[in-house]
Image (cartoon, helix red, strand yellow):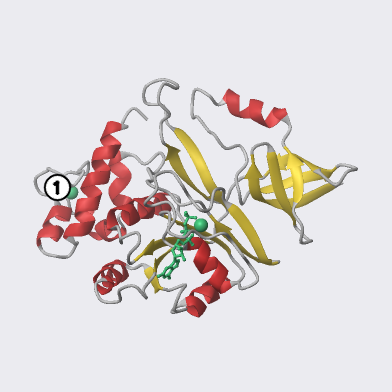
Amino acid sequence: MVIKGIVSRIESKDYYVFPASGEDNVRCSLPGKFKNDIKLKKDKQYLTDIVAVGDYVDYELNADGTGVINNIEARENYLSRKVPKIRGSGFKGERLEQIVASNIDNFFIVSSVANPPFNYKTLDRILVAGESSGLNISIVINKVDLDENFIGFWKKLYKNIGYNVFMTSAVSNEGIDKLKIQLLGKKNLFFGQSGVGKSSLINKMYSELNLKTGIISGFTDRGTHTTVTSVMIKIDPTTYVIDTPGIREIAPYGVLKQDLSHYFIEFLEFQKNCKFNTCTHSHEPGCAVNEAVQNGEITGERYDSYLRILETIEEDSQL
Ligand SMILES: Nc1nc2c(ncn2[C@@H]2O[C@H](COP(=O)(O)OP(=O)(O)OP(=O)(O)O)[C@@H](O)[C@H]2O)c(=O)[nH]1
Ligand SMILES: [Mg+2]
Ligand SMILES: [Zn+2]
C-alpha cells in the first residue's frame, strides 16, 4: 500500500516522514535508484540533496514499521544555498547546491538586535536567496529586549522596502503572539545566523516543544551550532514549523550577475530606466539605480549590499 507523507528530518541514510494522516514519524530508506537518477544529470548540475525536508513523498511500509520511499514529488519551491567549497574536491568552480527545505509557505528570516549584532549584509544575502526562490518572506528581528532604540532604523528601512517586519523577544515575549498567528495553517521555515534565537522563538510560540537552545551558541565559537540538523515539527495537521541550524554565511545558488538586481525588490521600478538594458548598476553611465541612490530613493546600505554580492557572483561566474 502506498502512503503519502512529508519528509521531516534526514539523518544520514534515514529519512523521517510524517504520514499525511497520523502523528508519528516513520523512518524510511531511499532506494539506490534515486541516486542513479541524479548521477545522470551530472554534467548539468551537481545536486547534493535528492530528498529534502519538506518534500512530499510516497512510501510503502515494511513489516517492522519502517518504510521505503518510492516516489518524490516535484517541489513547489525550495530554499537552497551553495555548499561552501570543500578544499581539494572536484574541479574549479564546482559548487554544490544544498536544499535547506522545500514547499515553504512562509519564509521567516530571523536576525537579532544584539548577540550576535544585527548584520544587514547577511540579511540582504538571505533576502536574495529567498527572492530568487520565489518565497513569501518575512523578517524577524529578535532580542528586542536588548536594545529597542537603534534597531528602529533597520525596522523602518526594511518596512519601507515593503517587507513584513516582526519585532520579537523570546525573553520578554514581545511580538510572540503576533508572529504565531502568521504560522497557522502554513509550512513555516525559520532561517538565519546562529544564535539569533530561532529555536528559542519556536519554543516560546509552542510551549509543548523543547527544542535545544544555546547558552550563547555558534556565533562566538566557530563551527558550533546548537541546532545541528533541520527539523520539521508538526504543530497540527496543517501547520508545520522547520527549525534550521544557524548559518555563518549564505551564497545564493544559481543567481546570475544580470539577475541580481531583480532580487533587490526596491530597485525594480528604477532599473527599467537605465540607459543600457544590460546595466549591472555598478559603473555604467546613465544608471537609474545609481541616480536613485543619489536621490535617497534607494538607501546606501542596500546599494552597498548589492555591490558586495555582485562582486562575489563575479568570482563564481563559471557557474
Ligand atoms: N536576550 C535575549 N536572548 C535570547 C532571545 N532569544 C534567544 N536568546 C538567547 O540566545 C541564545 C541562542 O538562542 P537559540 O534559540 O539557541 O538560537 P538559534 O538561532 O536557534 O541558534 P542555532 O541553533 O545555533 O542556529 C540563547 O542563549 C537564548 O537564550 C531574546 O529574545 N532575547
Ligand atoms: Mg537553534
Ligand atoms: Zn543601472
Where residue 225 appears, as percent x and y from the top left, is 48, 50
Report whether 283 appears left or right of 211.
left
Secondary structure, mark 1, is loop
The C terminus appears in which quarter of the rendering?
A: top left
Q: Residue at x 64, y 42 (%)?
A: 11
Name the residue carrying label 1: 275
Q: How many marks?
A: 1
From the viewer's perspective, is residue 125 above or below residue 312? below
Residue 21 sits in which quadrant? bottom right
Where residue 233 appears, as percent x and y from the top left, is 64, 60
Q: Residues within 10 Å of mark 1 (few under 14, many from 20)?
A: few
Q: Residue at x 11, y 57 (%)?
A: 291
From the viewer's perspective, is residue 44 above or below residue 5? above
Q: Residue at x 33, y 67 (%)?
A: 113
Report whether 303 appears left or right of 317.
left
- Is residue 147 visible in the rendered structure shown here? yes
Q: Nearer the viewer, residue 312 or 37?
A: 312
- Is residue 272 visible in the rendered structure shown here? no
Where residue 174 appears, as percent x and y from the top left, is 43, 79
Where residue 312 appears, as percent x and y from the top left, is 28, 38
From the viewer's perspective, is residue 250 above or below residue 134? above
Label 1 CB, ligand 3: below 8 Å? yes
From the viewer's perspective, is residue 65 above or below residue 294? above
Q: Nearer the viewer, residue 165 or 201?
A: 201
**Looking at numbered disc 1 in the image, what kind of residue is underneath it?**
Lys
